[in-house]
Amino acid sequence: MKKLLLAAAISFAMPFAAHAGADFVEGDKTWAGEAELGATLTTGNTDTSSLKGRLGLKHELGNWENQYVLEALYKEDTDVVTAERYYGGIQGDYQINDNSYVFVNTNLEKDPFTGFDYTSKSAAGYGHKFVDNGTTLFKAEVGPGYIYQRLDDESAITEGVESKDSIVAHAVMNFSHKISDTSTFKQEFIADWGEKLDGRSETSITANIVGALAMKFAVVVRYNSKPVEGKKSTDTETNMTLLYAF
């Protein structure tokens, strides 16, 4: 398992090294992105391994700004998997003017430790940048959304249903501030409220090491007001990762 994690880490990092530190332009299409990676391997009296990876891309084309995100988290302790989460999402923003835009997004998350085979969410609505001066960014989004969740076999028996779905009110708040020329603070809140409340908060500080390479410390909190029986409402995740911008 450790060889697989190490190979994945190398494979994840190498493709971005060639593009480090700059956006690239292909005709009238502009791309930019960042790759994030953290891994821990221990042997001996303690036998553990973990891998945290994230790839984020932005694509600007005319009035559209498209965002693509892939995330993976895997932890193993003495050959027992203790955490496993995979996430993929896409969002398109159509700029109305410098501060206002409309958005549409969809994502898919697989986390067997929540009692669901997978969770799919989609939303559309209006976004507004209240502050965007190059140092501080504060923006918010709101609109209707839809959540579909497929339960795993054990939870389906316990809950008496195979799936759950609902219409929700979707809201996002993003805040970032450059503390200095080399460090940035970010705070993101995401909430989907319908028959229950699903929320996610990520607080992070990023500090440049050299060039496009930075160190990122983040605390992620996930909340579900009505978890599957036997599961907890709140999950927390603390990460220290390397981040590479390109």
Image (cartoon, rainbow, N blue to C red):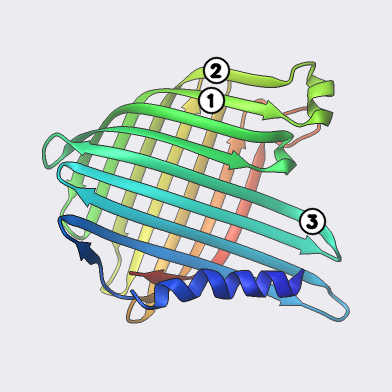
Secondary structure, mark 1, is strand
Q: Which residue is mark 3?
A: 81
Q: Residues within 10 Å of mark 2 (few under 14, many from 20)?
A: some
Q: Which residue type carries mark 3?
A: Val
Rendered residue at 52%/41% (across/down) = 200
Q: Residues within 10 Å of mark 1 (few under 14, many from 20)?
A: many
Q: Which residue type carries mark 2?
A: Ser
Q: Which residue is mark 1?
A: 147
Measure how far apart labels 3 and 1 are at the Cα level.
27 Å
Kindly tell me whether residue 3 is visible in this rendering: yes
Secondary structure, mark 2, is strand
Rendered residue at 69%/66% (across/down) = 50
Closer-to-camera residue (15/120): 15
Q: Which residue is mark 2?
A: 166
Residue 57 in the figure: left or right of residue 152: left
Determine contact: label 2, label 1, CB under 8 Å.
Answer: yes
From the top left corner, tell me how far across and down residue 213 is, in percent: 39, 77
| Above or below: residue 51 compared with residue 3 | above
Q: Quadrant of the C terminus?
A: bottom left
Closer-to-camera residue (119/3): 3
Label of residue 122 in the image: none
From the top left corner, tell me how far across and down residue 113 is, in percent: 74, 43
Q: Which residue type carries mark 1?
A: Ile
Secondary structure, mark 3, is strand
**Which is more N-terminal, label 3 or label 2?**
3
From the top left corner, tell me how far across and down residue 54 is, in percent: 50, 59
| Above or below: residue 124 compared with residue 173 | above
Measure how far apart labels 2 and 1 are at the Cα level.
6 Å
